[in-house]
Image: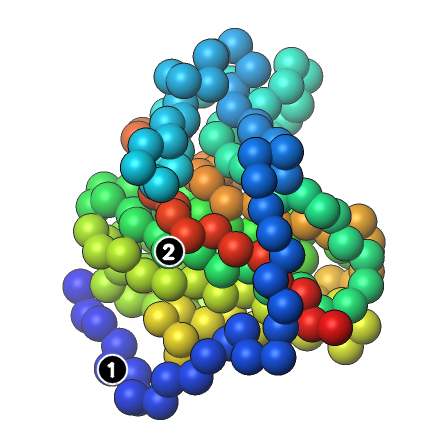
Amino acid sequence: MVCFLINDAHIDPTYGFVEVMLNETNFKYQKPYDTPLEQRYSYEKGTHRFWVYADDKPHYLGSKTQPRTEIHILPDYTSGIWQFEGLAFVPNGTSGATIVQIHGAAHGSTTIILRIYDGDMRYYSTPVIATCLYDKWFKVNLIHDVDGGKVTVFIDNQERYKTHDRGPGMLYFKFGVYAAPRNISYYMESRWKAIKIYKKL
């Protein structure tokens, strides 16, 4: 595996934002419809652990989507500048798994998807935006300027990717593990802690 060298410039992506306080009522869980939540998710000592298998069922009967165990964070939003922050860990062997996304858009079902393939993070299937992420904690900040139509990704306080969004809609952040349409490992897992949501006033 080749790791990309990055510069030493670090900034605080949350500067100018105000934290939106979260509690358990802000979390909506999604998991294979025929499997109890505790068989695909755990929360211990501040860490959310999500796992799924390639042959698991989707999150509701009749869905044609891939298996997932995810948390949808409330509130949903339709305007303004919002930010997700969390510390993520992906064990070696997990591949073809979305670990965080913004759901909703005018064009398509998602604004952005960040997937892990062979230890690298990609925007959907390409391009690669961060490398060598297996078996270590790394910080993810995902900023969505709805009115400006921009999405920015920070990894460990470094800006790694910026792109146009896919238009307005009923939008929300999700984190966990969600199998890609193809090229996936049989077992997929991610762990998360220190989850925060911010909004720019």
Q: Are marks 2 and 1 in contact (CB under 8 Å)?
A: no
List x then y, in percent, for residue 28: 61, 32
**Amino acid found under the numbered disc labelled 1:** Leu
Query: Percent x, y for residue 5?
Result: 25, 82
Instruction: Report helix, strand or loop for mark 1.
Output: loop
Task: Check disc 2 and give the amino acid type.
Answer: Leu
Is 105 drawn above or below residue 66 in the view shown?
below
Label 2 Cα crowd, 10 Å radius (few <14 / some 14-19 / many 20+)? some
In the image, taking residue 104 as reference, residue 134 lies left or right, namely: left
Q: Quadrant of the N terminus?
A: bottom left
> Which of the two labelled residues, at mark 2 and mark 1, occupies the earlier sequence position?
1
Measuring from the top left, give residue 122's x and y in whole percent: 43, 61
Q: Which residue is mark 1?
A: 5
Residue bearing the label numbered 2: 87
Q: Which mark is residue 91?
A: none
Can I make out residue 164 in this image? no
Q: Nearer the viewer, residue 158 or 25?
A: 25
Quadrant into which the C terminus falls: bottom right
Residue 55 falls in which quadrant of the image? top left
Closer mark to the observer between disc 2 and disc 1: 2
- 127 vs 171: above or below: below
Q: How many marks?
A: 2
Q: Residue at x 36, y 71 (%)?
A: 156
